[in-house]
Amino acid sequence: MLLAFINKALSFLLVAGATLCLLFVVFSGSVSNFPFNEFYWLQVDTSTIHDAGGDVTRWTFWGLCHPTAYESSKNGNCTSQGPDSPLSPLDNFGNSTSLPQDFVVNRDTYYYLSRFAFPFLLIALIFSGVSFICYIFSPCWKSMRRVTTFFVTFAMIFVLAGSACQTAVSVLARQKFSDSGRSAKIGPTMMGLCWAAVACLLIVFFLTCCGALRKAYVIHRDTIANQRAMELNQQQQMQPGPEDDLESLPQTAAQQSQINVPLSAEQSQKVVSASDTGNEFTQGALPSNEGGIRFFKIKRNRRNTDEESL
């Protein structure tokens, strides 16, 4: 009971934490207030790139930001390009000669990796939020536990896919900017929040799945035990019991004693007695003080074979 309560409480807290992390990740760059204005995926020194819009550029899901200094904690001067802004310098700055050529040659790699990351993380946020609501109402409905497991599973799949895509494109872009001699770094807070959501949902997934598997195993084990008990009970009912065998033994012994026990000469004289004048005789009549087998009394009419002649 205590372990089940700890499991539910821990799962609830982890789902709440994953939902909060995904909120910060998805809406960073769209809100100019704290703490959303401090999160970014990649920061690069773009002072030598024409049409960059500033000396420092930060990429978010909602556009580019140009802080006043490279070490500034706040984004600032963000250009609202709408949701799902790609991390593709060729699309962001145009075909500039100062761009590393890898952004031009492999433009589709950067564009589609960053474009797919946002919808994956947004879907993960939706599933995680629904899972959080289901955990709140799970004490009211037992079936809500299965619904929660379903939503947690899909949230984990999409957050893994989105985090992998965004991490890959951020690392590739930073590497190419660094190779060209420009200062570049990945936003540690944003990346930490993203993978923290992944870790939380993974733990919740294993907790819920392990709990569901354990419950299914217990139900299966009890079902098999009940079936075996029913089969054993049916077999016992079909076979004769020891009481039936004991009841049949005295009858058999009595029948055998009636057939096999011979009478002595003295007992036979007492048992079989005939009266010259009587019309009946007694078979098997023993004295009251002697034990033995008692036979039935048989009455017979005796006819005189010699009839007087008229």
Image: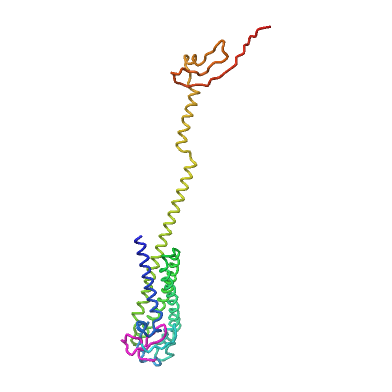
Which of the two residues, 261 or 166, is positioned nearer the viewer here?
A: 261
Identify whether 282 is placed above or below 243: above
Q: Residue furthest left?
A: 71
State the residue lying farthest toward the bottom: 50
Residue situated in front as seen by the camera: 208 or 167: 208
Give the position of the C terminus as an image quadrant: top right
Depth check: give the residue in front, 181 or 291.
291
Is the stretch drawn in magenta largely helix, strand or loop? loop
Q: Position of residue 99 (x, y in %)?
A: 40, 89
Q: Quick one: 166 or 203, which is closer to the camera?
A: 203
Q: Position of residue 156 (x, y in %)?
A: 42, 71
Occupied quadrant, residue 111: bottom left
Tally the numbered discs. 0
Q: Is residue 234 above or below residue 121?
A: above
Magenta region: which residues? 53-75
> Can you tell which quarter of the image residue 120 is in?
bottom left
Residue 228 in picture, x, y percent from top left: 45, 49
Q: Quadrant of the N terminus?
A: bottom left
- Residue at coordinates 40% horizontally, 69% vertically from top-left? 136
Q: Confirm whether the magenta stretch covers residue 60.
A: yes
Q: Is residue 67 magenta?
A: yes
Position of residue 214 measured from the top left corner of the image (x, y, whole percent): 40, 60
